[in-house]
């Protein structure tokens, strides 16, 4: 099974890069891009940065055919494989190597500062990941001396689960205007007691004709009243018939037109 170190990933691609032949460094003050022939680069092509395992490779390739011109393996950054110049942020010094192990130093430069920034960040991110992988491997090799958390049940320990037996909470009774609750009595008022059942008055005196005015008769304020029944608990049909006769007599005596 293939591991992560067997795959080659692409970190960054820049289509335009210039390559310069640089003079050997005479002092320890570093390289200066002003010492190079910046207006006449020795080679122009494409840069592709790849990573295989923990090693990054800076490859200089032809723009059209993709043929490899030179490559610089980088095992750490910053380091001797990639160095910056002291007078510009767009130029770097690379140590290239061939298949036989021979190495040489060349200068590379970008026309845009953004391309130089991407080149720098791509290398920094890769070696930051390498550092994290080293720390993780070291921690995995150390013995675990800390106390382990035991979440298992001890011997004889049980738990009880109550499922579907939750008590229903009483809902609060609504007391708004839409409810059916009784209104409280008025302050200082008295509640009238209902009349006793034995004192109900059944001796009502209905007026059949009301106060009718007869323009033709001499007695204009005649009022006809019904005869009282001697028996308060008598037959309702008898009282009804007795009430109907005075009404017929009154209607015949008056000159009102029956509608």
Image (cartoon, rainbow, N blue to C red):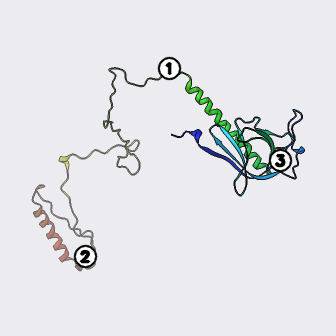
Q: Does residue 111 show up?
A: no
Q: Circle 1 sits in a helix, a strand or a loop, which is it?
A: loop
Q: Does residue 203 show up?
A: yes
Residue at mark 3: 20
Residue at (65% x, 33% y) in the render: 131
Cα separation, mark 2 vs mark 1, equals 124 Å
Circle 2 residues within 10 Å: few <14, some 14–19, many ≥20: few
Residue 149 percent coordinates (x, y): 47, 23
Closest to the observer, 82 or 124: 82
Q: Mark 3 touching mark 1, by CB under 8 A?
A: no
Q: Which mark is residue 217?
A: none
Residue 66 percent coordinates (x, y): 69, 54
Chain-order first, disc 3 or disc 2: 3
Q: Mark 2 touching mark 1, by CB under 8 A?
A: no
Cα separation, mark 3 vs mark 2, equals 147 Å
Residue at mark 1: 147
Cα separation, mark 3 vs mark 1, equals 60 Å
Residue at (88% x, 49% y) in the render: 37
């Amino acid at each position: 099974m293939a591991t992560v170190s067997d795959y080659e990933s692409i970190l960054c691609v820049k289509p335009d890069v210039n390559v310069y032949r640089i003079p050997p460094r005479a002092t320890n003050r570093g390289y200066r891009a002003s010492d190079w022939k910046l207006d006449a680069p020795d080679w122009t092509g494409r840069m592709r940065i790849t990573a295989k395992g923990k090693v990054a490779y800076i490859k200089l390739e032809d723009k059209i055919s993709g043929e490899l011109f030179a490559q610089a393996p980088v095992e750490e950054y910053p380091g001797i494989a990639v160095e910056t110049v002291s007078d510009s942020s767009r130029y770097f010094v690379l140590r290239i190597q061939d298949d036989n192990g021979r190495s040489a130093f060349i200068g590379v430069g970008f026309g845009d500062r953004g391309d130089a920034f991407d080149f720098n960040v791509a290398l920094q991110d890769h070696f930051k990941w390498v550092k994290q992988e080293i720390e993780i491997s070291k921690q995995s090799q150390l013995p675990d001396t800390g106390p382990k958390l035991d979440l298992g049940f001890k011997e004889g320990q049980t738990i009880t689960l109550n499922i579907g037996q939750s008590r229903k909470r009483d809902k609060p009774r609504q007391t708004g205007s839409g409810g059916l609750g009784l209104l409280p009595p008025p302050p200082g008022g008295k509640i009238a007691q209902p009349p006793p059942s034995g004192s109900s008055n059944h001796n009502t005196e209905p007026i059949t004709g009301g106060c009718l005015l007869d323009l033709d008769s001499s007695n204009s304020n005649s009022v006809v009243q019904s005869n009282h029944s001697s028996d308060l608990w008598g037959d309702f049909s008898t009282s009804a018939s007795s009430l109907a006769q005075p009404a017929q007599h009154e209607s015949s005596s008056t000159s009102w037109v029956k509608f």
